[in-house]
Image (cartoon, rainbow, N blue to C red):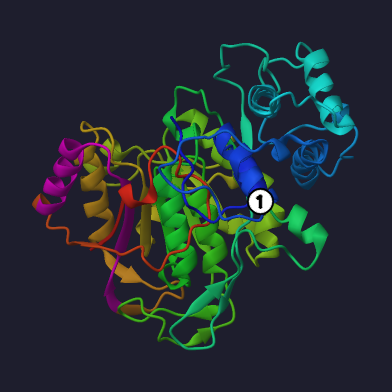
C-alpha cells in the first residue's frame, strides 16, 4: 500500500507532480481541515463524512480547475478546452477514485456538486475522443508507452541571506504576491511514465535530491561550467542553470559561502545522455522552459544538450566520438551542442541516478576519472590551481551494485566524500517509491 510521507507539499504541488492518487486526495482532506499532512507509515484511511459534502466536492473540482488554469491559461469552467496536466489519463483516474471513495466512505453521500459532476460527465462522455497521439487512450486499462505527461514544479528563487554564510529561498508552496506569477512561473518537465527508456520515464529520486542540494548550495555551480551525465528528463540541469545565475556568494576553495558577493553568475550547463528518446525529450524540456529560464536571468542558449556514450568516451583517446552538433544531427534543434568541447572545459560534473546497471559502472567511473583528471578552470579562464569536482546523487537500491561502484572509484583513485542532506529542504514531490533518505549524495575529486 502507498503511504503519505510527512513532506511539506501543498495538494496542488502533489497533483502537478503526478503523485499517487490517494495521496493527493488525503492531502486535499488535510488541507481542507487545516491539519498537518497525514503522518508517515499510515495507510489510507476512511475520511469523515464532512469531507464528502457538496462544498468539499466543489473545492475538489476547483483544485483541479486551478491546476489546469495554471498550466494552460484556459477557462476553468470549460472542461472541453482544457488540456489537463499532468495528463488526462491521470485526472480521469483521480476523479474516478474520488467518486469511488465518496460512494464507499461517505455513508450515503452522493455526487451533488455541479462543477464536479460536470467534470465527471466530461470524462465519461469523451473518453474515446482522445487518442494515444496526444494523451493516450485514457479509458484503456493498458498504458500507452508513447503517452506523455507534463509534471510541473514551483521552484523557489534563491536570494542571499542576511549573513555571509547563508543563502535562502522561499518554500515551494508559498504563494506569489502576484497571482499570475504564481500560476505561470512553473518549471515544466515532460515525462513518459510507461516508456521502456528509463531516462524519460520520470523525475528520479536522486535527480530531485541533487536539484534540491544545488538550490540550497548554489555556490557549487555559480560561475562554473557544468556538465551533467545521464541527465534524463533534464530537471537537475535546468535547476543548476537557474542556481548558477542567481545573485549570491561565490564559493571558496571549500565551496563555502565566504567568497565575494556576485550579482549574477555566468551560466554554462551542458546536459548529456545517449538514447534518441532522451535527446528529443531534453531538447523539448529546455525549449518549453525558455521563459522560465529567462525570468531567472538565464540565456536559454547557455543550456545545451548533447550525446555522450560512456564506454566510447572513456576508451577513445582523442575524445572525438559522439560530438554531435545541431548541424550534424537535427534532432537537437537549436540546443544541439558539442559534448566533447563541453566536457573538456567543464569545472563541475553532475550525475544523478546513473548507478543502476553493473555492466555500465566501469565505463561510468572511467568517464568520471577522465573528466576529473584535467586542471580546474574558472569560467573567466583564470587558472587557480583547484581540481575539477563531480557531485553524484545515487538512490541506494542494491548493495551489490553500489558496492561495485565504490570499488571502481577506489581503483581509479577517486576520493569520495559523502554529504549531509540535513539542511536541504524538500522542494520536488518525487519521493513516493523511495524516501530521500535512500539517496546518497557525494562529491568526488
Density class for disc 1 (Cα within 10 Å; few <14, some 14-19, many ≥20) is few
54 lies left or right of 222: right
Residue at the image point whose x is 52% and y is 67% from the top: 244
Q: Is-magenta flag for residue 387?
A: yes
Residue 217: tell me if it is visible: yes
- Depth check: 151 or 54 in front? 54
For residue 232, above or below residue 144:
below
Locate the N terminus and report the quarter of the image it occupies. top left
- The residue that appears at 31% across and 69% down in the rendered structure is 376
On screen, residue 36 versus residue 371, left or right, reads right
Q: Which image quarter is the C terminus in?
A: bottom left
Q: Nearer the viewer, residue 291 or 377?
A: 291
Q: Position of residue 27 (x, y in %)?
A: 60, 45
Q: Residue at x 61, y 56 (%)?
A: 301
On the image, the x and y values in percent for residue 169 come to 57, 71
Q: Is residue 188 visible?
A: no
Question: How far from the left and from the top, in percent, is residue 199?
Answer: 45, 34
Q: Which residues are magenta?
A: 385-410
- 260 relative to 27, above or below: below
Pinpoint residue 359: horizontal percent, then vertical percent: 21, 31
Given residues 396 and 388, the one toward you in this image is 396
Residue 21 placement: quadrant: top right
Helix, strand, or loop for circle 1? Answer: helix
Q: Nearer the viewer, residue 289 or 112?
A: 112
Amino acid at each position: 500500500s502507498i503511504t503519505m510521507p510527512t513532506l511539506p507539499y501543498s495538494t496542488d504541488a502533489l497533483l502537478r507532480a503526478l503523485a499517487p492518487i490517494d495521496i493527493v486526495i488525503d492531502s486535499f482532506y488535510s488541507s481542507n481541515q487545516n491539519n498537518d499532512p497525514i503522518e508517515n507509515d499510515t495507510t489510507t484511511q476512511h475520511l469523515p463524512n464532512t469531507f464528502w459534502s457538496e462544498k468539499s466536492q466543489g473545492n475538489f473540482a476547483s483544485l483541479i480547475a486551478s491546476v489546469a488554469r495554471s498550466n494552460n491559461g484556459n477557462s476553468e469552467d470549460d472542461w472541453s478546452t482544457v488540456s489537463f496536466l499532468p495528463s488526462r489519463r491521470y485526472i480521469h483516474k483521480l476523479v474516478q477514485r474520488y467518486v469511488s471513495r465518496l460512494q464507499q466512505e461517505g455513508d450515503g453521500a452522493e455526487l451533488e456538486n455541479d462543477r464536479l459532476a460536470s467534470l465527471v460527465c466530461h470524462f465519461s462522455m469523451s473518453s474515446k475522443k482522445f487518442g494515444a497521439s496526444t494523451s493516450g487512450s485514457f479509458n484503456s486499462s493498458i498504458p500507452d508507452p508513447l503517452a506523455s505527461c507534463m509534471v510541473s514544479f514551483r521552484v523557489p528563487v534563491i536570494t542571499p541571506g542576511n549573513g555571509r554564510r547563508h543563502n535562502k529561498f522561499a518554500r515551494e508552496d508559498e504563494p506569489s504576491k502576484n497571482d499570475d506569477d504564481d500560476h505561470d512561473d512553473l518549471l515544466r518537465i515532460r515525462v513518459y511514465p510507461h516508456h521502456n527508456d528509463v531516462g524519460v520515464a520520470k523525475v528520479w529520486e536522486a535527480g530531485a535530491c541533487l536539484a534540491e542540494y544545488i538550490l540550497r548550495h548554489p555556490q557549487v555551480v555559480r560561475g562554473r561550467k557544468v556538465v551533467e551525465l545521464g541527465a534524463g528528463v533534464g530537471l537537475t540541469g535546468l535547476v543548476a542553470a537557474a542556481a548558477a545565475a542567481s545573485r549570491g556568494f561565490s564559493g571558496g576553495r571549500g565551496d563555502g559561502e565566504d567568497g565575494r558577493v556576485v550579482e549574477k553568475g555566468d551560466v554554462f550547463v551542458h546536459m548529456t545522455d545517449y538514447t534518441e528518446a532522451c535527446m528529443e525529450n531534453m531538447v523539448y524540456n529546455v525549449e518549453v522552459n525558455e521563459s522560465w529560464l529567462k525570468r531567472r536571468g538565464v540565456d536559454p542558449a547557455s543550456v545545451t544538450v548533447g550525446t555522450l556514450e560512456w564506454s566510447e568516451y572513456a576508451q577513445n583517446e582523442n575524445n572525438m566520438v559522439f560530438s554531435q552538433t545541431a548541424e550534424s544531427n537535427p534532432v537537437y534543434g537549436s540546443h544541439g551542442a558539442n559534448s566533447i568541447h563541453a566536457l573538456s572545459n567543464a569545472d563541475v560534473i553532475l550525475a544523478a541516478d546513473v548507478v543502476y546497471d553493473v555492466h555500465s559502472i566501469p565505463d561510468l567511473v572511467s568517464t568520471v576519472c577522465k573528466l576529473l583528471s584535467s586542471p580546474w578552470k574558472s569560467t573567466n579562464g583564470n587558472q587557480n590551481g583547484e581540481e575539477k569536482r563531480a557531485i553524484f546523487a545515487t538512490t541506494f537500491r542494491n548493495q551489490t551494485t553500489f558496492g561495485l561502484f565504490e570499488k571502481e572509484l577506489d581503483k581509479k583513485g577517486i576520493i569520495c566524500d559523502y554529504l549531509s542532506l540535513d539542511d536541504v529542504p524538500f522542494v520536488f514531490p518525487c519521493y513516493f517509491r523511495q524516501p530521500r533518505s535512500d539517496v546518497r549524495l557525494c562529491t568526488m575529486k
